[in-house]
Image: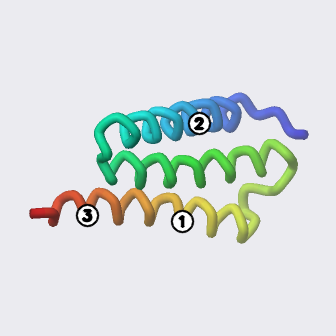
Amino acid sequence: MVFDPTVVLNLIFGVIILILGLWVYRLKKMMLALYVAFGFALFAISHLAILLGTPSSDISIIIIRSLGYLVVIYGLAREAWRK
């Protein structure tokens, strides 16, 4: 296990945003909160994988992070175009 304080901090913040997103969705049924929560869950998974020894340049990490960004982008775009 590799200890990098930046990756640990990103993991902690990612998990906090995941929990808050799920909480907001549960309280207000806002789909945007669910998309943000899912996107940050993917970021947290990538940070955990790095802490467990996967190189940050590994293709699986790049794909997981890209999916995280795409989920958040989709959620925000969906909200912007909602009537």
Q: CA distance from mark 1 to mark 2?
A: 18 Å
- Residue at image mark 2: 15
Residue 4: name its quadrant. Answer: top right
**Element class at badge 3:** helix
Q: Please rate how many residues cluster around mark 2, counting C-alpha atoms within 10 Å: few if below 14, some from 14 to 19, many from 20.
A: some
Q: CA distance from mark 3 to mark 2?
A: 23 Å
For residue 1, above or below residue 31? above
Q: How is the image coloured?
A: rainbow
Which quarter of the figure is the N terminus placed in? top right
- Seen at 46% across and 60% down, the residue is 69
- Can you give x and y, in whole percent of width and height, for residue 37 in the image? 47, 46
- Tell me the amino acid under the disc marked 2: Val
Q: Label 1, label 3: how many angstroms apart (C-alpha)?
A: 16 Å
Instruction: Check the image and report above or below for 68 versus 20.
Output: below
Residue type pointed to by label 3? Ala
Could you say where residue 44 lies in the image, as x and y percent from the top left? 63, 45
Q: Which badge, 1 or 3, comes first in the chain's sequence?
A: 1
* Residue at disc 1, secondary structure: helix
- Horizontal arrangement in the rendering, residue 17 relative to residue 49 (left or right): left
Residue under label 3: 77
> Going 30% across and 47% down the picture, which residue do you hit?
30
In this picture, is 19 found above or below 60?
above
Q: Which of the two discs, 1 and 2, sits closer to the camera?
A: 2
* Dots 1, 2 in contact, CB < 8 A: no
Residue at point 28%, 57% (across, down): 76
Q: In the depicted view, which residue is nearer to us: 17 or 58?
A: 17
Q: Nearer the viewer, residue 67 or 18?
A: 18
Q: Amino acid at mark 1?
A: Ser
Q: Position of residue 39 (x, y in %)?
A: 50, 54
Residue corresponding to mark 1: 66
Q: Residues within 10 Å of mark 3 (few under 14, many from 20)?
A: few
